[in-house]
Amino acid sequence: MTGKEHDDHVDRVWELAKRIGIAMFVTWDGKEQRARPLAATVEKDEGAIYFLIDVNGEKDDQLAEFPHVSVSFADHKHSKYVALSGKATVSNDRARIKELWTPFAKAWWDSPEDPAIRVIKMVPQDAELWDSPGRIVTTLSMLTAAVTGRSPKIGENAKVVL
């Protein structure tokens, strides 16, 4: 992969993650992986993805002991997927919580001043993306491959170091 291709893939990873917006956030508790959907704030310029969480959950304890996490974004309708791995930390940064506050967060907390809110900062180290031209084109390509015996051309797949 050329430097330009790498940079294009990195840009696409950040773009897809931001556009999709909801991620499956996966932690390790020492025995099993734990996954849950979280709303993501993607900040490419900072090289970070932020999540608001409640202090009463288990995520903060899991991250204190096992900070390596996986985050996956899926847009099944358009056949676009991104999986990222990296380190995550939890903080009680009240200014950052206020910056990340959205009307969506109101479903979980009354205001950004709620003392139970924490923020996870995930810094991805690597990513993999699957970016196809869409469900119809992908389906047609797979049907053609089944008839012709050739491999389907279902879009782009790339592994990149961020």
Image (cartoon, rainbow, N blue to C red):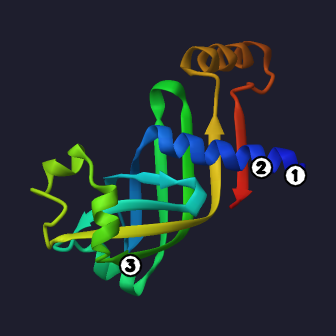
Give the residue at mark 1. Answer: 3
The reply to whether callout 1 and callout 2 are in contact (CB within 8 Å) is: yes
Q: CA distance from mark 1 to mark 2?
A: 6 Å
Give the residue at mark 3. Answer: 63
Pinpoint residue 47: horizontal percent, then vertical percent. Answer: 58, 62
What residue is at 13 percent from the left and 67 percent from the top? Answer: 114
Report whether 80 appears left or right of 38: right
Residue 16 badge = none
Say if 71 sits above or below 33 in the image. above
What residue is at 62 percent from the left and 47 percent from the top? Answer: 13
Q: Amino acid at mark 3?
A: Leu
Give the crowd class for mark 2: few <14, some 14-19, many >=20 residues within 10 Å: some
The reply to whether callout 3 and callout 1 are in contact (CB within 8 Å) is: no
Give the residue at mark 2. Answer: 7
Q: Amino acid at mark 2?
A: Asp
Callout count = 3
Residue furthest bottom in the image: 65
Pinpoint residue 49: horizontal percent, then vertical percent. Answer: 47, 59
Give the crowd class for mark 1: few <14, some 14-19, many >=20 residues within 10 Å: few
Q: Based on the displayed image, in which of its 4 quarters is residue 94 positioned?
A: bottom left
Question: Which one is earlier in the sequence, the residue at label 3 or at label 1?
Answer: 1
Say if 137 sits above or below 60 in the image. above
